[in-house]
Image (cartoon, grey):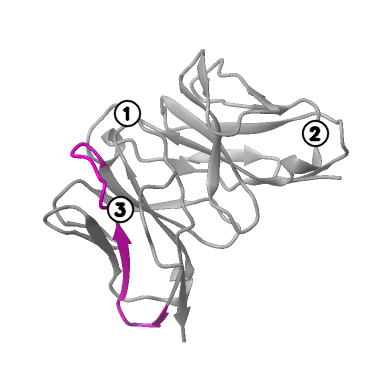
Amino acid sequence: NAGVTQTPKFRILKIGQSMTLQCAQDMNHNYMYWYRQDPGMGLKLIYYSVGAGITDKGEVPNGYNVSRSTTEDFPLRLELAAPSQTSVYFCASSSTTGTGKQGTDTQYFGPGTRLTVL
Amino acid sequence: DAKTTQPTSMDCAEGRAANLPCNHSTISGNEYVYWYRQIHSQGPQYIIHGLKNNETNEMASLIITEDRKSSTLILPHATLRDTAVYYCIVRALAQKLVFGQGTRLTINP
């Protein structure tokens, strides 16, 4: 199991450019999440998905879009990059089915994408 | 907003037990206590969680008071690699994880 993988690891964008941050998980988890973490701060939820075809906004969704066409993938789209979107982005997944630790919705995180917008 | 209160920072000597406290006085009956940690620049790592009984796994022990208003995460033999920010999070199943500021734990040689 690779767990949760994210690409790219690093990216520099110019203001107004767009990009897609990729996230994939191979644990057959139904829930997936996108967080951002600004320097010295805790994580803030951007969007989440409870299953393929279903997405919902978190605390800070403005400037982002998501889609969930498969169980495995949950890409995050930035349409018009702004300096305020400079951050580290983490993807996570969890399962609300099953037993034991898996059944209690433990979230597993990817290694992150460090994005700078200049 | 985070429903927990943790000290901003703590120090511990290598090889000793690190005891990290967390207050969650408004916890509801269906809410679990989760602990995650984040080593510099990495994604948060799950450590342990519990509802009302004490829990132990290969990484740590979780002690929850009888009234469930506070808990302590114990790393029994801290190593330098345990230096990280530790987050105590209270949530019910399928609720969002809300990360506060956490406790910055420094393990000293």
In magenta segment, residue B27:
yes
In the image, what residue type sits under mark 1?
Answer: Thr
Could you tell me which secondary element the residue under label 2 belongs to? loop
Sequence-first disc among 2 and 1: 2
Asked whether residue A7 is in view, the answer is yes
Q: In what quadrant of the picture does the N terminus of chain B appear? A: top left
Chain holding disc 2:
A
Residue drawn 25% across the image and 45% down it? B27
Residue B18 picture location, percent across and down: 33, 74
Residue B84, above or below B100:
below
Residue indicated by mark 2: A81
In the picture of the structure, the residue carrying the numbered disc 1 is A96
**In this rendering, does residue B59 appear at all?**
no
Nearer the camera: disc 3 or disc 2:
2
> What residue did someone put label 3 on?
B48
State the residue at coordinates (25%, 40%): B31
Secondary element type, mark 1: loop
Decide: few, some or many residues near mark 3? Use Cα within 10 Å; few <14, some 14-19, many ≥20.
Answer: many
